[in-house]
Image (tube, helix red, strand yellow):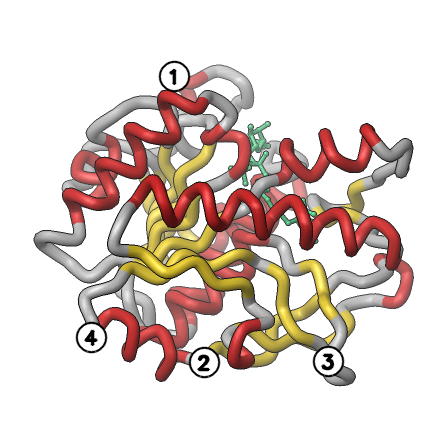
Amino acid sequence: MIVKYGGNAMKNLELRRAVAREIAELRGAVPVVVVHGGGPVIERELQARQIPSEFRQGLRVTSPQAMDVVEMALCQLNKQLSQEIGQAVGLMGRDSHLLTADLLDPELGRVGRMTSVNAELIRTLLGAGLTPVIGSVAVGPDGEALNVNADTAAGAVAGALGQGIMFLTDVDGVYRDYPDPASRAATLSRAEVQEGIADGWIAGGMIPKVQAALDALDRGAPYATIASGMHSGVLAQAAAGQAGTRITP
Ligand SMILES: Nc1ncnc2c1ncn2[C@@H]1O[C@H](COP(=O)(O)OP(=O)(O)O)[C@@H](O)[C@H]1O
Ligand SMILES: CC(=O)N[C@@H](CCC(=O)OP(=O)(O)O)C(=O)O
């Protein structure tokens, strides 16, 4: 299983450690690959340096200066998470061409569009009994660092491995009437996702998440679920269809 662990769900250290324990328990039953974000940590580090930041369609416009901060912040988080999960190896997408990307749109600066995943490296680590923990900075055509949205990176990893993906975030799933949790959709089809984006009830950081879920399904992932990483037990519940929003083809 691929677990995408979002920055918004890991703001609380105690909770982050609880999720790390849950991931460690889960891998007794299934091999687990973690892909993580870290939006709030990046934000904090940019603010500390008075570097302004702007989002378009859920993607951070990334200047070369901001790219350095993104990489620094995600690298540190990567090591913390790997240590907390244990028997894990923390890698950035730049290691051994784990994640490669092209420039998505010059207007967004150093933001990457995923082009490939080194699935062999991931399988080698899993084969050695280690959990890969992957930060979403990819290597570009000229060897430069590119900022890839972590949902997009995780979707590409799930697609490349042909495995299911669980997106852990700070909401219980996709709400038809955000922010009312009672409006959570148990399942959403591709047509409903497209309608949600067009009508605006799927917005901001939820857009790359649902798109990454569809992308993973298109590439052969057996399931893609968006669920909350804010309470314990959610991985097992969501896997059993008892929590979150399952995106269907
Ligand atoms: N329809 C929706 N249902 C739930 N959340 C939504 C919806 N539309 C937008 N959002 C926003 O998406 C956020 C989750 O995305 P994001 O902030 O990028 O999280 P993460 O750090 O986990 O990737 C929610 O906190 C919420 O503000
Ligand atoms: C291009 C782009 O937007 N990159 C993201 C990468 C981190 C991320 O995606 O973190 P979450 O999973 O916490 O949202 C960013 O700079 O915030």
Q: Closer to the camera, 200 or 10?
A: 10
Q: Secondary structure at mark 4?
A: helix
Distance from label 1 to label 3 (Cα)? 46 Å
**Residue type for callout 3:** Gly
Tag nearer the camera, 2 or 3: 3
Tag nearer the camera, 2 or 4: 4
Please tell me which of labels 2 and 4 falls first in the chain: 2
Image position of 192 with respect to 242: above or below:
below
Tag nearer the camera, 1 or 2: 2
Compared across the picture, whether 72 is left or right of 13 comes to right
Residue 131 seen by the camera: yes
Distance from label 2 to label 3 (Cα)? 15 Å
Farthest residue to the left: give it: 29
Image position of 53 with respect to 116: above or below:
above
- How packed is label 3: few (under 14 Cα within 10 Å), some, or many (20 or more)? few
- Position of residue 82 measured from the top left corner of the image (x, y, whole percent): 38, 49
Tag nearer the camera, 1 or 3: 3
Q: Secondary structure at mark 1?
A: helix
Q: What mark, if any, has residue 62 been given in the picture?
A: none
| Residue positioned 83% across, 66% down in the render | 105
Please tell me which of labels 1 and 3 falls first in the chain: 3
For disc 3, the marked residue is: 143
For disc 1, the marked residue is: 182
**Residue type for callout 1:** Ala
Q: What mark, if any, has residue 127 been given in the picture?
A: 4
- The N terminus appears in which quarter of the rendering? bottom left
- Position of residue 91 measured from the top left corner of the image (x, y, whole percent): 48, 63
Q: What mark, if any, has residue 118 been given in the picture?
A: 2
| Contact flag, marks 2 and 3 (Cβ < 8 Å) | no
| Contact flag, marks 2 and 4 (Cβ < 8 Å) | no
